[in-house]
Amino acid sequence: MKRREFIKQTGIGIGVLALWGPQVFSAHAGEILPKKGRRVVVAGGGFGGATAAKYLKLIDPKLDVVLVEQRERFISCPVSNMVIGGFKEMKDITMDYKVLARKYGIKIVNAQMTGLDATAHTIETSAGKIAYDRLIVSPGIDFMYENIPGMDPQAQALFPHAMKAGDQTVQLRRELVALVPGQNVIITIPEAPYRCPPGPYERACMIAHYLKQNKKGSRLIILDANEDVVSKGKLFKAAWKDYYEGIIDYRPDSTIKKVDVATRSIVTVAAEVQGGVINIIPDQKAGLLAFQSGLVPPKRRWVPVSALSFESPIHKDVHVIGDATDGEVIGSMPKSGFVASTMGKAVAASVVAMMSGREPLPPSLANTCYSMVNEREAIYVTGVFEFDARTKKMAGVKAAGGVSPERSERLGIQAEDWARSIWSDTLG
Amino acid sequence: MKATLFIAAVLAVSTAPALAALPGDGERMAATCAGCHGTRGASPGTHIPVIGGQSSDYVKKTMKGYKEGTRAGGVMANLSKGYSDQQIDQITEAVASWKWQNSQNARKKGKIKISASGTEVCAGCHGAKGQGTPIGPHISGQAAGYLKEALSEYRSGRRTAAEMGMVKEMTDQDFDKLVKFYSQQK
């Protein structure tokens, strides 16, 4: 399809282009979307990147903003555990990026970023080169399979992590439904920090709920590399005791030593367990893109950035946000969609300031995260993080951090509203 | 020499692009609110209220109430403690400066007929159509679930306000009527 036809068929005027896909540019090597005015390119359209792109436009509508994202549609990690439990469907957590193009004039390039030339101020993508004045990278996470002996590509395919919502969410759900009653399910949890601290425990609730109603005799074994539940611990354990006694078998301090595909078993220091469904959540590191772009120093897992501007100390005019950022450098914060979203808003303000020679603005970050413990009741955790000029890190405000006093249906309703709101704040 | 400098200065001014106004401290802190209350406070939820364009006095009183524990709350009871009183003033000014956008979650079924006297008791503080007055918050076009919950909480005593004492005598049916009426107002 020729470019003009593409534009015509999709009904989009030249001024507000959307979805420049590889199909449009496969014949063109070299640069796409030649840069005319001041431009920020955002690579990665998760909660961090998509929010940054939108808020750049809200702050400075004249700025040329390009969002590069390889997935055609956004699939939300929050609420994806409800899909695994059978309370929601994939369509409930799948959204598209069109509104960002239509409403704000963000140019969306449906392609994968593959490299960075920070000196030339260009990125390499599967659709061609794109020039920028400033770049915001929101690379997300990747997995350190190399830390688990036996975790070869075959094992990776058989034992999904489902920590990036998508095909693996569907796979885990399908396997649960197909489980032979009496066979066990295993979840393994890596040592913190990892994406979404309460996520694996919420998933345990969803799976246990499903087993209780549908798979007589099946148990859920949680092998946690941490010494205790990482987030909302008392609340999760209370729910496990009240609702899933005899189903959830929680084993702290249980780092995986080995996996065996043939016997479907996992070996820890203390035991060897077998499972009909095995959900292995490996150790995590910054997304591949961060490594390909040279944003991670040798021997490190996460991306160092200035806590004030999120600019990389390695590459000038390149900012990094989201789960991939290094908590030891910017201050410890949960790797959550909500925190990434507030980082997106903060970096947008600082980038607009810095592009016009002004100082970056101190970020104001926060976290609000609900977890479901069954199909109706939820619990939450909160945090507010402010820039400490002395340590040059973000620091949690003590009084604002904490969890809900109890679980309730009222919070379950709020959890649903929370999801609608953050989805619309990110993509709508 | 002076003339040259003057010309150079004029040129610099006239060719420099207009700088985008940067969001102030209040606007940047308030951006966090959008995570749960929608972009610029236009909540898409059924129970989490619209706050953009709400009266600043009311938002301020509410957030300080959460902070001091005089108003019972969920996440807001925690989050409000993350900001100084001065910061809360800045945040609430920003929230109030946003444009009010009616909730998409009105009680839709059937246009409600309610006699003028049925809302008289509310109109004094909330305005004839519930659009808010200096002494009462904007309630028209508010999320229906939120309005119902607020009324129920004033009745049960979980929330307190002397001005809301009249709801103690009301029934759930009365609440439903009021919720329908106000959530449907444009």
Image (tube, coloured by chain):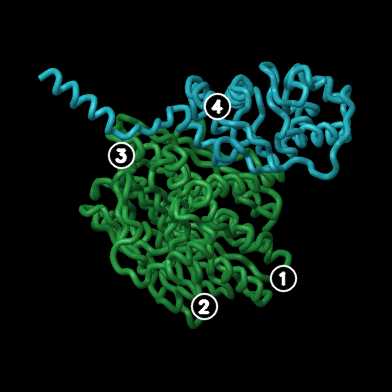
Chain colours: A green, B cyan
Are discs 4 and 1 located on one and the same chain?
no
Badge 1 density bin: few <14, some 14–19, many ≥20, Cα 10 Å: few
| Subunit of label 1 | A
Q: Which residue is mark 3?
A: A355
Q: Which residue is mark 4?
A: B97
> Looking at the picture, does residue A311 appear above or below residue B114?
below
Q: Name the amino acid, label 1.
A: Lys
* Residue occupying image coordinates x 66% and y 70%: A218
User: What separation in Å lies between label 1 and label 2 (alpha carbons)?
Assistant: 20 Å
Closer to us: A4 or A212: A4
Q: Nearer the viewer, mark 2 or mark 4?
A: 4
Q: Name the amino acid, label 2.
A: Arg
Closer to us: A28 or A232: A28
Q: Nearer the viewer, mark 3 or mark 1?
A: 3
Q: Nearer the viewer, mark 3 or mark 2?
A: 3
Q: Quadrant of residue A111?
A: bottom left
In the rendered structure, find residue A216 and report the number of the disc placed on it: 1
Q: Quadrant of residue B169?
A: top right
Q: Is residue A338 visible?
A: yes
Which type of secondary structure does the marked residue at label 3 adopt?
Answer: helix
Q: Are marks 3 and 1 in contact (CB under 8 Å)?
A: no
| Subunit of label 3 | A
Are discs 3 and 1 located on one and the same chain?
yes
User: What separation in Å lies between label 4 and label 3 (alpha carbons)?
Assistant: 26 Å
In the rendered structure, find residue A413 and report the number of the disc placed on it: none
User: What separation in Å lies between label 4 and label 1 (alpha carbons)?
Assistant: 56 Å
Badge 4 density bin: few <14, some 14–19, many ≥20, Cα 10 Å: some
Q: Position of residue A360 (x, y in %)?
A: 33, 34
Q: Name the amino acid, label 4.
A: Ser
* Residue occupying image coordinates x 75% and y 40%: B106
